[in-house]
Every structure is written in C-alpha cells, then in structure tokens.
Image (tube, rainbow, N blue to C red):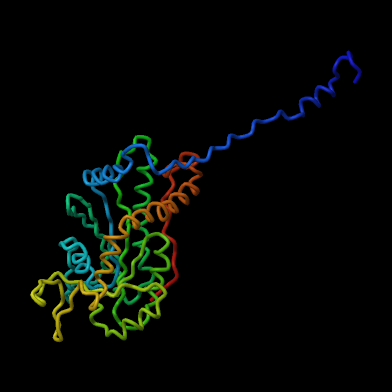
Amino acid sequence: MSKGLPETRTDAAMSELVPEPRPKPAVPMKPVSINSNLLGYIGIDTIIEQMRKKTMKTGFDFNIMVVGQSGLGKSTLVNTLFKSQVSRKASSWNREEKIPKTVEIKAIGHVIEEGGVKMKLTVIDTPGFGDQINNENCWEPIEKYINEQYEKFLKEEVNIARKKRIPDTRVHCCLYFISPTGHSLRPLDLEFMKHLSKVVNIIPVIAKADTMTLEEKSEFKQRQESMPFAVVGSDKEYQVNGKRVLGRKTPWGIIEVENLNHCEFALLRDFVIRTHLQDLKEVTHNIHYETYRAKRLNDNGGLPPGEGLLGTVLPPVPATPCPTAE
C-alpha cells in the first residue's frame, strides 16, 4: 500500500486478525530461606500448644466399627481397647430366638475423657454378619451404612448456612474379626475386605488368638499378605507376680492381654489409639470421603447433592453389587 492512500477493508480485516500480545503470567517468587539464627524469639513454636488447648476444649470424634461372626469377642475386645464399657455384650442366642436374617447396624456413643482431652467415641456394631448359612452379599448393609454417613457429611458441607462444626458420623476404622480356625481366610473374609477396603480403613484381627497354637498363628500370618493382629480381649483382672493385669484364665495359666509374649493386643492398641488415630481420621476424610464426594458431585453434574440439573432430587450412590461368597 502506498503512503497516503486510505486503508482498504482487506487491510482492516487483516489488522483485526493480528493477535494482541498477552502479558506473561506472573511467576510466584520462590520463598527465600532465612537463617535459622533469628535475632530474637518470635513464638512460632506456640502453635502446638494453641492446637492442644483447642483440642482439649472442643474434643474430637472417633467412630469405630466392629464386624465379625457372633461369639468372637468383639464387644469384649473394644471394651478392653478403651478400658471402659463402651460396647454392650450381646447375649447368646436362645433356642426360641431366631438369628436375624439381615445384618443390623447399631451405633452406641460415649464420651471418654483422659488427661483433660475429651473424645466422643461411637462404636458401630453389626450383629448378624456371617451368621447365616447363605451369607450372599451380607456386607451390603455395612457398605450402605458407611456411604450414608458420607452423604450426611456432604449435605452438611454444601449448605450455605452450614454449621461451624459439622457432626462427623463417618466410620474412621473398621475392626474385622477373623475366626481363629488356624486355616486360611474364608471366601467371605476375602470378599468383605476386598470390597469394603475401598470405602473404609480395615484392620483385620484374629479373634481369641489364645485358642490357636504358636505354630498355627505363625503359619496363618505367613499365608496372608496383610498380617492381622492376633489378639485376646478381657475385662477381668488377675494377680500375676504381685501385679494386677488384664487377662483370661485357662487351665494351663493366665493369658495376659497386654503381654506381647502372649498376644498382640498392645500392638493393636498402640496402632489404633496412640500412633495412628489421627492418620485414620485423615485417610477417611482425604481419601475415602473425597472419593465418594467427587463421584457424587460428578454424577450430579457438579451440583450439590439432592439438586439435579433440572431441580430433580437424585438418590444417594447405591452400594456396589458384589459377587456371591458363602
């Protein structure tokens, strides 16, 4: 184009196609390391004490589920674990009574206080599990209950005017009781742990391990990839070498519950309460709950649960169907 001539339409269109230069995104500055030798005391280390005081004031929740056949000492072990009557012992079935045809879910809440720290403990029992001749899909009510607790938490979480502290009924830990037969795991055991491990933290335990010989326990553990805790529970005390200890009296002596030479109860207690309790809660929230939440919102088009794309109410995520295990 010669100088001084008016701009044509073609030239104007071409000028519009030329993209304008975009500013480069700002790159965040890397944190500069400061010499650890500070000029004076700041008080950063007091955050631990602040967190401790807050926890002592508000307390915390811990929800534990026990699953296994009747007669394996589930209630006794939980009572031994927390050294209080937090789980009611189920009475043995009378001849006139009928065994429940379906798995029942019973939750009992307690407040335990130790050293000024309050813990709201909820024990979820599952009577009727594995007690039928045909145990086809008997874990489905348990899976449904666990997902229902995730659904409750999710609905509270997405509310506009939600509570400052959402009630947490999610199952943080599931103790799965294995029958002390001395043989390998039953198909029901394998199927339960295979499917429920996707939605909850499972800790397998060999119940009433004092009924097995040392060789049987060793062989059983060697056959399993995840080694279960071989435990014994008891709420009775006996005098042993001048000390009062929890134990079970047998014709050949007293089985001391907290003696590692007799059983692994102390290891289980330390794992669940003293070293990994917070980890169990965090895995429940960050992995199991987040997996449920992502699937729920994705199935709902990214909207809060209960509201569909056209305002229709959507049902909760159904329990995943599992193959038959007898």
Residue closer to the observer: 210 or 70: 210
Outermost residue, right side: 2
Q: Please give the count of numbered marks on the rendered protein.
A: 0
Q: Residue 85: x and y, percent?
A: 15, 62
Quadrant of residue 230 in the image? Answer: bottom left
Q: Is residue 282 left or right of residue 17?
A: left
Residue closer to the observer: 292 or 140: 292
Quadrant of residue 50 in the image? Answer: top left
The vertical placement of 213 against 92, above or below, is below
Q: Is residue 11 left or right of residue 206?
A: right
The vertical placement of 182 against 289, above or below, is below
Q: Residue 190: x and y, percent?
A: 40, 73
Q: Residue 319: x and y, percent?
A: 41, 59
Q: Is residue 113 left or right of residue 309?
A: left
Residue at left 24%, top 75%?
Answer: 260
Quadrant of residue 95 in the image? Answer: bottom left
Q: Is residue 284 left or right of residue 114?
A: right
Q: Quadrant of the C terminus?
A: bottom left
Residue at left 22%, top 52%?
Answer: 119
Residue closer to the observer: 101 or 187: 187
Q: Quadrant of the N terminus?
A: top right
Residue closer to the observer: 197 or 144: 197
Outermost residue, top side: 4
